[in-house]
Image (cartoon, rainbow, N blue to C red):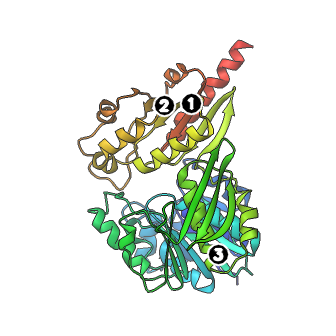
Amino acid sequence: MTKIYHFIGIKGSGMSALALMLHQMGHKVQGSDVDKYYFTQRGLEQAGIKILPFDPKNIQADYEIIAGNAFRPDNNVEIAYANEHGISYKRYHEFLGSFMRDFVSFGVAGAHGKTSTTGILSHVLSNITDTSYLIGDGTGRGSAGAKYFVFESDEYERHFMPYHPEYSIITNIDFDHPDYFTSLEDVFNAFNDYAKQITKGLFIYGEDEQLRRITSEAPIYYYGFEKGNDFVAHDLLRSTTGSTFKVSYRGQELGEFHIPTFGRHNIMNATAVIGLLYVSGFDLNLVREHLKTFAGVKRRFTEKVVNGTVIIDDFAHHPTEIIATLDAARQKYPSKEIVAIFQPHTFTRTIALLDEFADALNQADAVYLAQIYGSAREVDHGDVKVEDLAEKIVKRVQVVSVDNVSPLLDHDNAVYVFMGAGDIQTYEYSFERLLSNLTSNVQ
């Protein structure tokens, strides 16, 4: 009898990617979740994976059950039923830790840039050789015959501790998830523990002073823009069609590379991938060829044009990510006004990084703020409102509601950058409807 994999919370970005991967490897997969639409469910529906409402009847003792980390006995009937009846289940990261042992695995960790870097590595490697991968935008690919496995390595609640990949990239260390981590040192300690589990090669952004403190049994290779690194990106040419740059390895020129994405951070992400694949023995001419066709990942600088207006959707929810996204927008649209629409994600993060959010958003020409999107994990919302952030922003700023985004129309020749990890897309869709209605009213 074929084993059935049941996912509790299948719409989660990591969970949906894992479900798709197992489905493509020939396994029977189903899952349950809330009725609310989430951007990952489209891929699940297209694959014919059944999505059920939460119900204790979904749980069978002979299923392989994988539970999303947000769900506990006190907030989920399926978890409660499994606990009550002694039915075992694994958390996502626990399952992944055992699953990856069957492959040569490549992890991508870091406070920011994990999903984009995992996307670049997955794209390039799967075009060179048979590769399974999990990307944090809800994308997964599974192949029963694959030798290689690329995955995103998430530090939240130290979920990456069951992972022991042969190779890993670490993009940066930054203070985030203040609902769990107590300090920057606490974050560093988590990454340092993870680094000790890498067996063959660790690729670290060398201009991050925290990362320079990392120690590992595996050889460490540093990448960056400065000469003190092993892999150095230089002779940068940033244009409206992407970024071209050269890479050298310990003084040896590896040639010129082009990636059709924007922002200095994406040059670094690509350099990390080039370094990893070079050290692990892949042909750099093939790496060069497939970097040119990388189309990006979901909700990372995803663009559309509505009624002649450029709209960018991005997951940026930390000040460092906001700066990187706005930098990318200015590279691609140097002559346009950059309008940021931002939804703070979690009250704890907003309180902890209020000044940093204001400084980051001041990189835009105008700022619109949505109400703070709280997390189900937050019991106390704290003494913070979105208006507190607005007061600290020196650029033109206004708080808008999802029912009235018409103030956004007060700009000519603008690019609109919607950023956040909550339901900022509902604001985006409201604006798109408004633009579409303008067209129909003119006609």
Marks 3 and 1, the one that precedes in the sequence = 3
The residue at the far front in this view is: 251
Residue assigned mark 3: 278
**Mark 1, residues whose alpha carbon is within 10 Å: few (<14), some, or many (≥20)?**
some
In depth, the one of 93 and 65 nearer the eye is: 93
**Left or right for 341, reference 42:** left
| Amino acid type indicated by mark 1 | Ser
Instruction: Residue 16 in the image: state x and y as whole percent.
Output: 60, 62
Marks 2 and 1, the one that precedes in the sequence = 2
Marks 2 and 3, the one that precedes in the sequence = 3
Q: Residue at x 28, y 67 (%)?
A: 185
Residue assigned mark 1: 430
Q: How many marks?
A: 3
Secondary structure at badge 2 equals loop
Q: Is residue 429 above or below residue 132?
A: above
The C terminus sits in image quarter:
top right
**In this view, the mark in front (2 or 3):** 3
Is residue 39 in view from this perspective?
Answer: yes
Q: Residue at x 58, y 75 (%)?
A: 106
Q: Are marks 3 and 1 in contact (CB under 8 Å)?
A: no
| Amino acid type indicated by mark 2 | Val
Dividing the picture into quadrants, the one containing residue 246 is: bottom right
Q: Are marks 2 and 1 in contact (CB under 8 Å)?
A: yes
Residue assigned mark 2: 402
| Amino acid type indicated by mark 3 | Tyr
Secondary structure at badge 1 equals helix
Secondary structure at badge 3 equals helix
Instruction: Residue 340 in the image: state x and y as whole percent.
Output: 49, 34
